[in-house]
Amino acid sequence: MGIIYLMLIVSLCIAAFFLGFFFWATKNGQFDDDYGPSVRVLFEDEPIINDVNNGSSKV
Amino acid sequence: MAGSKPAKERPDQYAFLDLPEIRSRYISFENEQQVRVNLSLPAIHCSSCIYLLENLHKLEAKILRVQVHFARKEAAIVFSPDYKLSELALLLNYIGYPPDFSRNEETKKKQDRTFLFQLGIAGFAFGSIMLWSTPDYFGLGQDNATFRNFTAVLSFIVSLPVLLFSARHYFISAYKALRSKSINLDVPITIGIMALYTQSVLQIFSWQGAGYMDSFAGFIFFLLIGKWFQNMTYASLSFDRDFSSFFPVAIQRVKPDLSKEIVPIEQLQIHDLIEVRNEEIIPCDSELLSEETFIDYSFVTGEAQPVLLKKGAFVYAGGQVQGLACRLKVNATTNRSHLTQLWNETKDKTPKNQLLRYQDRLSRYFLLILLLIASVSGIAWYFIAPGAVFRVVVAVLIVACPCALALSAPFTLGNAMRALGKAGLYLKNSSVVEALTSIDTIVLDKTGTITDPNSYQITVAPHHLTDQEFTVFVNMARQSTHPLSKALASAHEAAPELELLQLEEIKGQGMRAEWNGETYLLGSAAFIGEAHLAKGSELFLKTAKNCAHLRFESSWRSLAIQRILDGYGANNCYVLSGDHNQDSEALLGLGFLKDHLFFELSPQQKTAQIQQLQKAGKQVLYIGDGLNDVGALGTAAIGLALSEDMFRFTPSADGILEAKSLVNLIQMLRIGRFAKRVLQICLAFSLSYNIFGLCIAISGQLTPLIAAILMPISSITIVLLSTLLIHFKYKHSFKS
């Protein structure tokens, strides 16, 4: 029976972790724009040569 | 291709952005390596826009990074310090995304994310408590007191932030309502929350289990979801613009030595000389110094035709110059101009009488009946079993907690608002939907609202010009900046290009050109030598053999007008116009009643007219588009701003209606009325759930398990019901 206390606490910790994760995401503005990211993920990756030429995509 | 059609551009169009004081308004961050700016780009509308803008560094190496915020139609752009802000603006304009510099103030507003935190905490508590209450639901934890108390204390800890943080809004709202001696729905909600919470805490600390903590957290969670659904707004639209976003940011000032400089309009002084170019807006009341110019006042006064002003004439701020650039002497600064005064006057007026929310009215009776039932069952149980009185009274208060009732309005109105948005009517918030249901009178502005400002009905009379000759005239008109010529040219955009010889424009009179050895004249009656024919707003054409004149008439949105008149009856439709009454015949022909048409009204008179109708007990919907409608829009029960282009300047209003959706106005109002019926159905449903729960509570058989099942089920029924009904109504209305 003792194992259930451990499991309860572990489950609470997991839930709290996700709550913290949700807070972090909210603070970072992850939920501000619900359309842009879904499109952005489909864009081709930039060839890295660009970086060497003019360093324009740094930061 | 993405974006909008590029606006006509001048290389110095954005030169004002390089003035240090204006530049600093838009720059959000700057150091030696990079400059960061947040620009509002209203033309963003699809995924290609995001692609194009975020790859802008391929077009211009000095742009380092672009991040588009789609919902707000903004772009955060990082560029190198040797790149000018004006160059950036010009590039954006060139590729079809003219930046909107008037929205700067609004975009600076920080987003409030507290609500998401509240929702997160409530969801976390709800899930956790439900999880460790599961054994309880199946009757498994009953025999193990240690385990039961352990989970009960955990529930208590987890629920504390829900009570203190997530539910805060309801306590504050109920307290405010009670203090102003009124009752809103938040009062019974607060009573329910209190009953739930105290009963649960008492149970927990008398070591009898977790009580109703699961219901409590779930209750708050559902309520907050409803609120979140209701509070959705159109982030990219602004409903409360003030006059300053209508005027240009800066203007060309002519110095005494006749050199020109660009200054922000706040810096203009009385007696300054300014130069205003074609299609620019005059920022101050001033005196005309150029020989003559056409000024389009349609947005300010509602006059459809541009007015010709001569040297020395007084020009009101807000007019748009049509044709050649003109010079003006400032008579009053922008803050003191006629237009601004008018705006402030209407702004300070007493706010609209707030319609009492439907569910708030209902909640009075609800609260009364609830307290009655609680006390009656308490007294009854005193005689049956005195020990159970407290338990039963609390159970009644708990089960009657109007969760489903509180969700009915947010979901129904929120769904209706979304359906209307899909149909082209964007409301400021969902309470406007409620006001829509009671509208019985429709008042329309004329110019730009029931007329289409972008097209004229051009009639040629007498019509014996050959098509060939007419094409020559259209080609001549293309070269002119005269408003009527421009209207002619745009009405016949498809006409083939011809090469004209010896084209010359005689300012203020007309044009002369040669084609195939014949001379063509286009201009005023006097110009073609037929001065006796002169009448207002006409353009005369003359070839060697023929002579004809063109009459320009407003082109009506006839279908929309017809449907509105059919739907509401001519008796309940009015037209208020700031224009002269030359169109009254046409309006009568369209079916309006003679004594329901008003012309030459000042903005104040429009407002007074609306007030008079409202005094007669009418619920007025006003639709207008111009600055002269600001007062009327604010006075009417609902004011809708009509807009050809959703992101252009619109006067502050309760909603923005797409011009092309005006034809569907009646269907939209019907959706509004249907929403009210859906709300009533939902309320009936939730009340029956409450009555069912009350029966259980009064008989003294309420357990946490029943409460935990009853509440979510009733809430989900309401959500499904309102969503499906509104969805079907929308499908049904706009099927064809």
Image (cartoon, coloured by chain):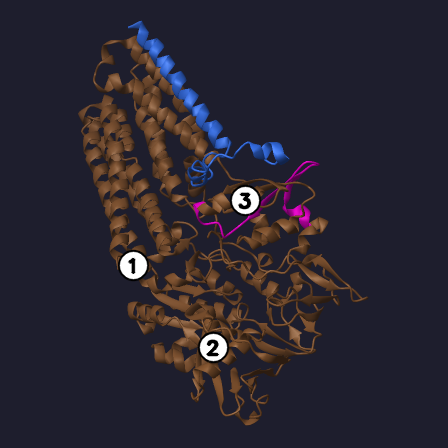
Q: Which mark is residue B315?
A: none
Instruction: Report the chain holding disc 2.
Output: B
On whether residue B719 falls in the magenta region, the answer is no
Image quadrant where residue B296 sits: bottom right
Q: Which residue is mark 2?
A: B599
Q: Which mark is residue B75?
A: 3
Q: Which residue is mark 1?
A: B670
Q: Name the residue at 55% across, 49% down.
A: B40
Q: In this orientation, which residue lies closer to the viewer: B163 or B392? A: B163
Q: Name the residue at 28% across, 19% down.
A: B133
Task: State the extent of the magenta-drawn residues as a range.
Answer: B22-47
Q: Nearer the viewer, mark 1 or mark 3?
A: 3
| Tag 2–tag 3 contact (CB < 8 Å) | no
Up the image or down, B249 lies above or below A58; here it is below
Mark toward the start of the polypeptide (1 vs 2)? 2
Q: In this orientation, which residue lies closer to the viewer: B512 or B663? A: B512
Q: Quadrant of the C terminus of chain B?
A: bottom left
What is the CA distance from the residue labelled 2 to the residue labelled 3? 44 Å
Q: Name the residue at 30% across, 27% down.
A: B215
The answer to whether residue B210 of the structure is visible from this angle is no
Amino acid found under the numbered disc labelled 2: Phe
Looking at the picture, how far across and down is residue B200, in whole percent? 33, 22
Amino acid found under the numbered disc labelled 3: Ala
